[in-house]
Image: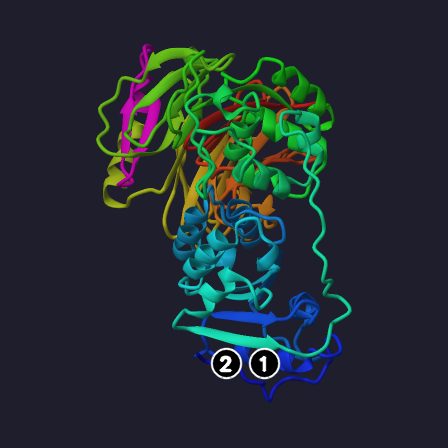
C-alpha cells in the first residue's frame, strides 16, 4: 500500500520530539493532490501518535504565506460512538446530520461555501466505544471528494487492520520512543444516571450519546448507528429522555451551559414522555433566554403532530392567531397559535410543492410554487379591485420570470429571484434592489411605521431595504451558511426578524436594536416564522416548536 512521503516545502518547525519523520510524512501527504484521501497514523502505545495529530491541527503555513488552507478538524474518538462522532463532525463542518449516513450525504451534496474542504483528524480509534462502526464511517467519508482523513490508532486495533486493507490508504508508522503527550493508559469514563435530566444535561454530551446508543437501552430497543426508533416514549427505558436526546442530538452535543441544553432537551420531548420530566427540565432551563410555549413531534397525539414542515406563515387580519403550515405534498394546514390545535386546511388547488406562503392582511393567502409561479387563495372578505389588479400583474410577471421567494403587506407584493435581486411590486410602481450574490432564498415585508423588506440569500447574508431607498449597506446578519428561511413581523416588542441557516442555527434579530437570540433544535430547520405576539416558530421534518423570548 502507498506511504506518505516528506514534502520539500516543509518549513522545519518541529513537532513533539521523536515524531519529526511522521510530521514530515503527514505534511507531504497533505500537499500531494494524488495521495489517498485516508492516512493512518499507527504505532505502539506511547509512540506520540495523538500528540502528532494535535500538532498537525495547529500547524500553520510558513510566515508570509497567505494561501488559505483547508480546515483541520480534530475530533477525539476515545469513548465515542459513531453517532456521537457524526454529530461532532457535522457541527464542526457546518452541516446538519441526524445519522452517520446523513453526514456522508450532507458532505457529498451540500454547497462548498458552508463546508469548504477539510481534513478530519480522528484520534484514539482503539479507545472508541464502536471502533468497527467508526471504521465503516471513515471508509465512507474517504469517498467524499472534499474531505481528507487522518486516523490514529495503536497497531493492534482490529478496526485499524480493516482500514489498512483498503486499496487507497497511506500509512505513517511511528515506531520511535514514547512521546510525552501520548498517554498509554486510557481514562475511565464515568456515566451519569441516564434517567436523571439534571445529570444528563450536566454530563459530557458525547458520552451520554455513547451510553444511550451502546448498551444503556433495555433489551429489545434498537441502539444502532442510525439511532433508536422505539415504538413509544416510555419504551426507551428513561422516561422519554433517550428519544428526545436522539431527536436533538447534534444540538445537545455542542458546548453550551446546562440550562441551554435543558431547553433543547425540553423542546425535543414528546407528549408520551414521563410527565415529571417536563417541569423538571423547565426548571433546569430557567437560565436559558427562551421559554418553550409548546412543541409537537412525530408520533404526538394530543394534539396530533401536524406533519413535516416545509413552509410556515403567521396570518393576520381575519386569520389573526392562525398558523399556516405547509408540507412537502402541498397541503397547508391551519393551526391555532395558542396550542397548535387543528383549525382546518387551506382550500387551494396548487399542484406540486409550495416554496413560500404570504398571508395578506385581508385574509388572502399568496402562494409560490416550486416553479416560481404565483397562486392566490382568496379569503372570506372581498378584495379591493386595486389589489386584484396588483396580484394579477405580479402573477403575469412571474409566469415569465419565476420567483424564488415571496412576501406581502398591505399594498405590496415582494418577490426574490435566482440572480440575487428583490422586487417590490406596489400601487406606486416597481422598486428593485440587487441585494444578494446568488439566489434569494427568502423575503419578508413588515408594515411598521417605516415599512421595510428583509431578504436572505444563498450567500448567507440577511439584508434590510425600504423600497424607494437604497438598501442598508451593512447586512443585518452574515454567516458562512446559506439562509434557508426568513420571516419578519411587527410585534408588541417592535419589529422582529427570524432567520434559519443551512447549518441548523436559528436567530431572532431586532432591527431597531437589542440583543439577538439563537436556538438550535438539532435537526435541519426547514422554516421559521414570527407571530404577531412575538413568538418564534421553528419547523423541521419531524417537529414544530413555538418559543417565546424571555423579557
| 23 relative position to 31: left or right | right
| Residue 382 colored in magenta in the image | yes
Can you tell which mark lies on residue 228?
none
x and y percentages locating residue 497 in the rendered image: 56, 33
x and y percentages locating residue 514 in the rendered image: 71, 34
Q: Residue at x 56, y 65 (%)?
A: 156
The relative height of residue 104 versus residue 292 in the rendered view (above or below) is below
Q: Secondary structure at mark 2?
A: loop
Q: Give whichever of discs 2 and 1 has the lower sequence position.
A: 2
Can you tell which mark lies on residue 25?
1
Can you tell which mark lies on residue 3?
2
Q: Which of the pair 22/70 is nearer the observer?
A: 22
Q: Secondary structure at mark 1?
A: helix
The relative height of residue 355 versus residue 119 in the rendered view (above or below) is above
Q: Residue at x 59, y 75 (%)?
A: 67
Question: Which quadrant of the rendered structure holds the N terminus?
Answer: bottom left
The relative height of residue 103 versus residue 250 in the rendered view (above or below) is below
Crowd rating for badge 2 (residues with CA inside 10 Å; few <14, some 14–19, many 20+): some
Crowd rating for badge 1 (residues with CA inside 10 Å; few <14, some 14–19, many 20+): many
Q: Residue at x 67, y 73 (%)?
A: 60
x and y percentages locating residue 133 in the rendered image: 47, 52
Q: Residue at x 39, y 51 (%)?
A: 105
Q: What segment carries the magenta color?
A: 365-388
| 502 relative position to 351: left or right | right
Q: Which of the pair 542/396 is nearer the observer?
A: 542
Q: Are marks 2 and 1 in contact (CB under 8 Å)?
A: yes
Amino acid at each position: 500500500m502507498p506511504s506518505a512521503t516528506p514534502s520539500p516545502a516543509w518549513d522545519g518547525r518541529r513537532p513533539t520530539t521523536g515524531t519529526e519523520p511522521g510530521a514530515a510524512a503527514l505534511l507531504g501527504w497533505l500537499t500531494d493532490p494524488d495521495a489517498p484521501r485516508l492516512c493512518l497514523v499507527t504505532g505502539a502505545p506511547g509512540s506520540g501518535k495523538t500528540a502528532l495529530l494535535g500538532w498537525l491541527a495547529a500547524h500553520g503555513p510558513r510566515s508570509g504565506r497567505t494561501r488559505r488552507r483547508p480546515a483541520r478538524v480534530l475530533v477525539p474518538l476515545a469513548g465515542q460512538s459513531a453517532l456521537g462522532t457524526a454529530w461532532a463532525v457535522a457541527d464542526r463542518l457546518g452541516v446538519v446530520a441526524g445519522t452517520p449516513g446523513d453526514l456522508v450525504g450532507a458532505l457529498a451534496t451540500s454547497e462548498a461555501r458552508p463546508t469548504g474542504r477539510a481534513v478530519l483528524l480522528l484520534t484514539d480509534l482503539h479507545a472508541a466505544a464502536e471502533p468497527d462502526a467508526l471504521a465503516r464511517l471513515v471508509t465512507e467519508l474517504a469517498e467524499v471528494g472534499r474531505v481528507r482523513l487522518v486516523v490514529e490508532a495503536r497497531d493492534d486495533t482490529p478496526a485499524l487492520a480493516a482500514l489498512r486493507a483498503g486499496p487507497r490508504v497511506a500509512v505513517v508508522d511511528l515506531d520511535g520512543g514514547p512521546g510525552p503527550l501520548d498517554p498509554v493508559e486510557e481514562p475511565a469514563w464515568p456515566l451519569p444516571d441516564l434517567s436523571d435530566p439534571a445529570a444528563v444535561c450536566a454530563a459530557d454530551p458525547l458520552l451520554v450519546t455513547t451510553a444511550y446508543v451502546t448498551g444503556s437501552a433495555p433489551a429489545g430497543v434498537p441502539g444502532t448507528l442510525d439511532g433508536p426508533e422505539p415504538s413509544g416514549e416510555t419504551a426507551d427505558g428513561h422516561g422519554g429522555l433517550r428519544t428526545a436526546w436522539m431527536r436533538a442530538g447534534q444540538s445537545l452535543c455542542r458546548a453550551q451551559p446546562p440550562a441551554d441544553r435543558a431547553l433543547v432537551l425540553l423542546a425535543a420531548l414528546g407528549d408520551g414522555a414521563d410527565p415529571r420530566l417536563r417541569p423538571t427540565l423547565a426548571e433546569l432551563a430557567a437560565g436559558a433566554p427562551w421559554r418553550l410555549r409548546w412543541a409537537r413531534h412525530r408520533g404526538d397525539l394530543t394534539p396530533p403532530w401536524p406533519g413535516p414542515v416545509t413552509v410556515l406563515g403567521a396570518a393576520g387580519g381575519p386569520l389573526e392567531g392562525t398558523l399556516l403550515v405547509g408540507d412537502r405534498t402541498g397541503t397547508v394546514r391551519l393551526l391555532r397559535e395558542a396550542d397548535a390545535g387543528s383549525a382546518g386546511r387551506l382550500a387551494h388547488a396548487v399542484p406540486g410543492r409550495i416554496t413560500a406562503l404570504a398571508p395578506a392582511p385581508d385574509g388572502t393567502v399568496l402562494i409560490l410554487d416550486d416553479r416560481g409561479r404565483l397562486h392566490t387563495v382568496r379569503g372570506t372578505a372581498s378584495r379591493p379591485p386595486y389589489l386584484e389588479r396588483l396580484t394579477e400583474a405580479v402573477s403575469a410577471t412571474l409566469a415569465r420570470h419565476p420567483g424564488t421567494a415571496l412576501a406581502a403587506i398591505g399594498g405590496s407584493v415582494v418577490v426574490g429571484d435566482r440572480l440575487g435581486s428583490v422586487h417590490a411590486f406596489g400601487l406606486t410602481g416597481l422598486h428593485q434592489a440587487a441585494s444578494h450574490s446568488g439566489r434569494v432564498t427568502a423575503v419578508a415585508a413588515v408594515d411598521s411605521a417605516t415599512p421595510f423588506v428583509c431578504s436572505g440569500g444563498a450567500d448567507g447574508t440577511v439584508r434590510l431595504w425600504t423600497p424607494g431607498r437604497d438598501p442598508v449597506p451593512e447586512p443585518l446578519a452574515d454567516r458562512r451558511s446559506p439562509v434557508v428561511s426568513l420571516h419578519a413581523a411587527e410585534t408588541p416588542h417592535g419589529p422582529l426578524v427570524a432567520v434559519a441557516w443551512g447549518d441548523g442555527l436559528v436567530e431572532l434579530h431586532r432591527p431597531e436594536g437589542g440583543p439577538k437570540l439563537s436556538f438550535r433544535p438539532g435537526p435541519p430547520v426547514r422554516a421559521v416564522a414570527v407571530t404577531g405576539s412575538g413568538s418564534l416558530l421553528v419547523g423541521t421534518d419531524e417537529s414544530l416548536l413555538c418559543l417565546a423570548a424571555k423579557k
